[in-house]
Image (cartoon, rainbow, N blue to C red):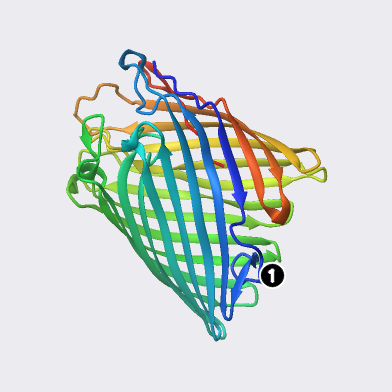
Amino acid sequence: MRYMPAIAVLSACLCSMPAVAQTPSTEGGAPARVHWGAVYVNPTFAVTNIGVDTNVFNSNEANRPQSDFTTTLTPGADAWLHVRRSIVTASVKEDLVYYRQFASERSVNGYYKVGAVVPLNRLSYNLGAGWLSARDRPGFEIDARSLRTESDAHAGFELRAWGKTFLSGTIRRSTVRFDEGAEFNGANLNQELSRVVTAADVSLRHLITPVTTLTVDVSREQDRFLFNPERDSTSTRVVGGARFGTRLAGSAAFGYRAFEPHAADLPVYHGLVANADVSFTTVGSTRLGVRVIRDVDYSYDFRQPYYVQTGATASYTHSLFGPLNGSARLGLQQLAYRGRLGLAVPVADRTDHIVLVGGSVGYRVAGGCESRSTWISSRGIRILQAPVTVACVMEHR
């Protein structure tokens, strides 16, 4: 059995620079705090995690779990540059992860993006690129802090076909590459998961109201693994959804995915996919949120190369008094694995379950920033059809 509770997590949003100008930006409608000529910048600084990790290396009780004080500082900035009618955007964020005793667990995780939008009369073009370098847990399945890099580039267009209807198309290419020494449960993550993804999609969106949009997306995706071509696959998606504003905010999309591995001994997946993140705010400043996901993802295990993830998370946030508010969160994730035909595996038709429980208390300070202390009783309970293991997932606000 494995138990890794987090004692405390503190999250704060601190404005690192005073507001020099409150000029509305064209990105997301947020005002820029710093303004130099045609350049608008929003600098940010956050303490996204501080507390004690009581099981740094995710060890079981027999291996004597070790604890350490940890904190994560996150400086960042978003910038916009207006060049006539065009807009150039850039985003930089770094997570500075510190462990007091175990220096091997310290890391600097960087996230960088740049893009441009060139609007014409009824047609606009966009292109961009991004880079990620991180040493963290890449998902619910892999419990090791694995060093990896991700790069991506895209180009697309959007055409205003009718008054409230827009047609767009995008092509993109991304590369996921793990460090050569990254391992988990005896598997080399670089050999198993490093890949190149090439995709193209066409989207149609229609404005029902100023705050409600209907969308339809059709995409084709090819995954080519750098060192293990037996994992290669091709996918086709058809997804419809909606985006909301005002009290009902967020987006929800549901559809169909045909996931077809190239290896003859791997079963295909033809079925439902979903991605929804919706919240509702009542008159009394109470916010109810729901997140739903169902999709296919790759596993590190060559014998069971992918799984279908199905999960939902519900959250409740309520204003306690004055600037103080509290929230609670409950979630469940299911990982249903697909194995190679005719190949023996330790657990046939393996299914893992992960339970997340957490909460927080937040205090809003001047300037729209928020200091938030997060209480974690998060226990990720991973249940196979055989033994039970327990892990903690530390939530970052």
Evaluate whether residue 263 shows in this view: no
Residue at (56% x, 30% y) in the render: 8
Q: Nearer the viewer, residue 252 or 265?
A: 252
The picture places residue 315, in percent across and down from the top left corner, at: 64, 37
Q: Residues within 10 Å of mark 1 (few under 14, many from 20)?
A: few
Q: Nearer the viewer, residue 237 or 49?
A: 49
The picture places residue 63, in percent across and down from the top left corner, at: 31, 17
Choose top left, top right, bottom left or bottom right for residue 4.
top left
The picture places residue 99, in percent across and down from the top left corner, at: 40, 36
Q: Nearer the viewer, residue 92 or 393?
A: 92
Residue at (29% x, 22% y) in the render: 347
**188 in relation to 64, above or below:** below
**250 in relation to 287, above or below:** below
Tag 1's secondary structure?
loop
Q: Is residue 137 left or right of residue 32?
A: left
Q: Quadrant of the N terminus?
A: top left
Residue at (34% x, 26% y) in the render: 350
Q: Is residue 282 left or right of residue 26?
A: right
The picture places residue 126, in percent across and down from the top left corner, at: 46, 74
**263 in relation to 143, above or below:** below
Choose top left, top right, bottom left or bottom right for residue 101.
top left
Residue at (31% x, 41% y) in the render: 146
Q: Which residue is mark 1?
A: 22
What's under tag 1, amino acid-wise? Answer: Gln
